[in-house]
Image: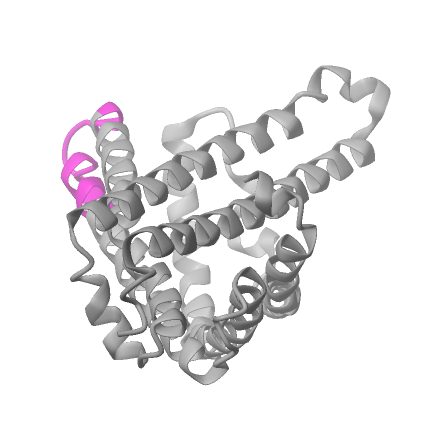
Amino acid sequence: MGWVFDRPVLTAIEVSWRWLFGVPFLLVCWARMQSVLAKLDLEASGFNAIDRQNPWVAAVQVGHVWGQYQPLCVAVLHWLLPVAGLGWAVVSGVGRSFLLNRLDARMRVRPAEMVALQAAFLLVMGAAFWGWYRSVEWAAQTTMAAAGEPDLVGFSCWAIFLTLGFFTLWALVSWALSMAPILMLLEDCGPAQALARCLRLGRPFTGKLVEINLVMGIVKLALIVLAMVLSAAPLPFSDELGADALHWIGVAAAIFYCVANDYFQVVRLKGFVEFWKMFRGNEGAS
């Protein structure tokens, strides 16, 4: 962590490529949202009439509102998700290539292969998210049956359990997708070979990589909580600060989370490189 902190240019590279994709993507999402609202505004959909005092009534009303917006949103997502996925793979592949080259000069820039590995990372993450969504949908259908009293406590327990479970599962398996680019560059092999080698690193090396990934997952959760605390701390002084100040504080908390998260992403990559030197540095070129 200290090594990365003393080299802020590394975090700047990570932040730059993420925001280079993220800012235009958010602008496109905003424009598409305005287009959807132009076809069906919030008043006509019943969104403004949602009962915020009664969660049971509000849940039914939200479901009714979403039922009206769903066809419009799905029509946009059919083309937006593939385009956004391709754009993210390209931008992240190029950005990570330059970052890894600055981490270790032996890792030469190979953007085409990096784009392929980043695309694989995105596909696996999408599959994990789809699994989480389907499992939570199952929990809702099981505990919120149309006939009978809805089991809100049971649904909440399942939702928390499944969310933390998938989050932990992702931390346990995603290290291979993050380590593959490093193996590809340090051991001069192809993307498929690098992924295959990730499965044959040996228990000591694999254990260290899983440990780092789990710790970084916990750090990400801590950053989310810290950002929420920072954004909520001024609420007792809302009358003195005003609504605009609270909005800017929320924006500052979101930026803090994004930058801190990117910093720890670089720390994780640096840790992976150091453990490669420890376990495979002498044989990596063979």
Q: Is residue 41 left or right of residue 55?
A: right
Who's the residue at 50% across and 78% down the image?
Answer: 90
Place residue 198 in its image quadrant.
bottom left
Q: How is the image coloured?
A: one colour
Residue reaching furthest to the front: 282
Q: Look at the image and say whether residue 144 sits in the magenta stretch.
A: yes
Q: Is residue 86 left or right of residue 230?
A: left
Residue reaching furthest to the top: 236
Who's the residue at 35% across and 50% down the image?
Answer: 275
Asked if residue 137 can be seen in this view, the reply is no
Who's the residue at 46% across and 61% down the image?
Answer: 69
x and y percentages locating residue 222 in the rendered image: 48, 31
Q: Is residue 136 depicted above or below 149 in this figure?
A: below
Place residue 241 in its image quadrant.
top right
x and y percentages locating residue 100 in the rendered image: 51, 65
In magenta, the rendered stretch is 136-153
Residue reaching furthest to the bottom: 112
Question: In the picture, which quadrant includes the C terminus?
Answer: bottom left
Who's the residue at 44% across and 26% down the image?
Answer: 54
Question: In the picture, which quadrant includes the N terminus?
Answer: top right
Place residue 186 in its image quadrant.
bottom left
Q: Is residue 136 depicted above or below 22 in this figure?
A: above
Q: Is residue 245 left or right of residue 115?
A: right
